[in-house]
Image (cartoon, coloured by chain):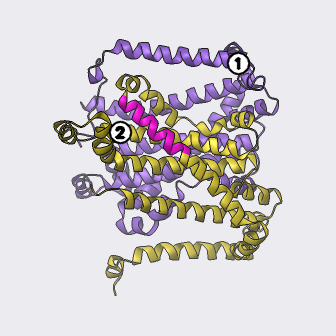
Chain colours: A yellow, B purple
Amino acid sequence: MTAVALARTRFAPAALGLFSFVVLIALVELLIRIGLINRFIVPMPSDIIAAFPRVVVEEHVLQRFLLTASEAFSASILVTIFGVAGGVLLHRYRLLRLATETWVAAVAAAPLVLMYPLYLVIFGRSALTIVMMGFTAGLAPIVLKTLEGLSGTRRVLINVGRSFSLTASQQFWKILFPAALPTIFVGLRLGLIFSLINIVGVEFLINFGGLGQLINELAERYDLPGTYAAICFVILVSICVFIIMERLERWLRPAD
Amino acid sequence: MAQTGRLILPASKPFGVPLRPVTTLRILIIAAVLVGWEALAASGLLYRDVVPSLLAIVRALVATLRDPAFYFHLGTTAYEIGIAMLIGGLSGLAVGIALGGSKFLSRAYEAYLYYLGPCPKIIFFPIMIMWFGVGPGSKIAMGAISCFFPVALNAAGGMREIDKVLIRVGRSFRASTWQMVSKIYLPAMRHPVINGVRLGLGVALIGTLLAETKLSNRGIGFLVIQAYSIFNMPQMYALLIILFVISIGANSLIGRIGRLDSIKRN
């Protein structure tokens, strides 16, 4: 098989990606073993892999994961209810939308996570601070996307509703809301990802809670392979969540 | 392409609603929030100083802005973010061009960037401390990592959207790689790149400042966490207001730079 033909096969790029990743890890291992990279700064990948079972068992990773998941779940419920309701409210009251839409967009662009010391003072060093931080971070995208979805409803669909003399409530539940669902799902995915990032980040910063705290604790103990293993674990969990959310969004989204 | 370059100017009567009631409502909302805040501060329902009086916040804001030490910390943070943007932005641009220019490379590596992009970057901070020390180096690294992903992904997307005719024109003139990048690729993909830089600046700001709050002895993030440590709530509010104004201002400034080009073209 020629190089060009190989390049055209479906799995060749994915294989190259994986191969490069493995080569990079092997190279780091080699450089550490021959002393070019200081092993007290970068632990050997083999040590990191060996640390995985230890971290999982001794550091109660499952309980920590469930704690982070429960915080993320609480924040998701809050952010979905208030985000969608906020979008519907702004769509329903045109004047309110004109007055505040730019403010909501500005809030979405602001580095809200920096308010975590303020939340620490208000809610204390507790899970509530973490949940509220996740809620704050995920709210604006859901409000904006709900508003965008409702406003983007095709005129012809609204006219169909009017021609059937639907009440305002029927018009909303039968026409506007179903038409806006695809865009609302995009907003939910974005908002929930923002929430999750902030939840893990604040757990790390305030040294409280689940997976974020695990990294902080291991780093403070100077358990290098453990720290790297915990970081890899959090990345893997995040990637799994992103993939599941993406699939869920595609599955729930009605066909266009 | 004509559609992407169209500038939508704000109408004086959007949706048929005159401007006056909108302004009135805005003023009413702001007034209600301020009055509600002051009432809450005076009520004593929350712990003292958690919601300080507006006067105390304004006083702290003026004192912070008049304090020369604040500008030293602001300069430190600006320096860290500037270097982080330079490193993360340029490397992101180079990787984005390489991935966007080759379907094979894109299918091999872009998924890694796509899924690593939204991961919480602050968890890399312990590693950055070990690699670059507790000084500005680790904060710059945090900012650079944060900024790299949005710039690379936007540049790769922008590169794929370049009109193939432009690329063929460049090749028919036998342009070198550098000439292709500077004369064809970058001008043609400026909108997604500017958008990537806008997003990158936002996350670089977060990455750098959060790192400063975690472990630092200088910078605005350090000032925020110091205000928390000594329970100087008016100063914390003042610093957060300044930070939000700066970040929202910088965000809209880059957005405007992107739109300026559209105005010229129209």
Q: Residue at x 31, y 56 (%)?
A: A254
Figure check: B126 above or below A30: above
Q: Residue at x 35, y 25 (%)?
A: A94
**Rendered location of residue A8, percent (x, y):** 32, 77
**Which of B219 and A216 lies nearest the eye of the viewer?**
A216
Q: Quick check: is A87 in the magenta stretch?
A: yes
- Over which residues does the magenta segment extend? A78-92
**Rendered location of residue B143, percent (x, y):** 61, 46
Q: Is residue B227 left or right of residue B104?
A: right
Can residue B151 be seen here? no
Q: Is residue A69 left or right of residue B131?
A: left
- Residue B41's label in the rendered image is 1
Q: Magenta: predominant secondary structure element? A: helix
**Rendered location of residue B149, percent (x, y):** 51, 53
- Residue A148's label in the rendered image is 2
Figure check: B24 above or below A129: above
Quarter occupied by residue B21: top left
Q: Residue at x 69, y 55 (%)?
A: A212
* Chain ID of residue with mark 2: A
Q: Is residue B247 left or right of residue A185?
A: right
**Which of A245 and A52 lies nearest the eye of the viewer?**
A245
**Three-letter amino acid code of the residue under disc 1:** Ala
Can residue A249 be seen here? yes
Numbered disc total: 2
Q: Quick check: is A79 in the magenta stretch?
A: yes
State yes or no: discs 2 and 1 in contact (Cβ < 8 Å): no
For label 1, the SS is helix
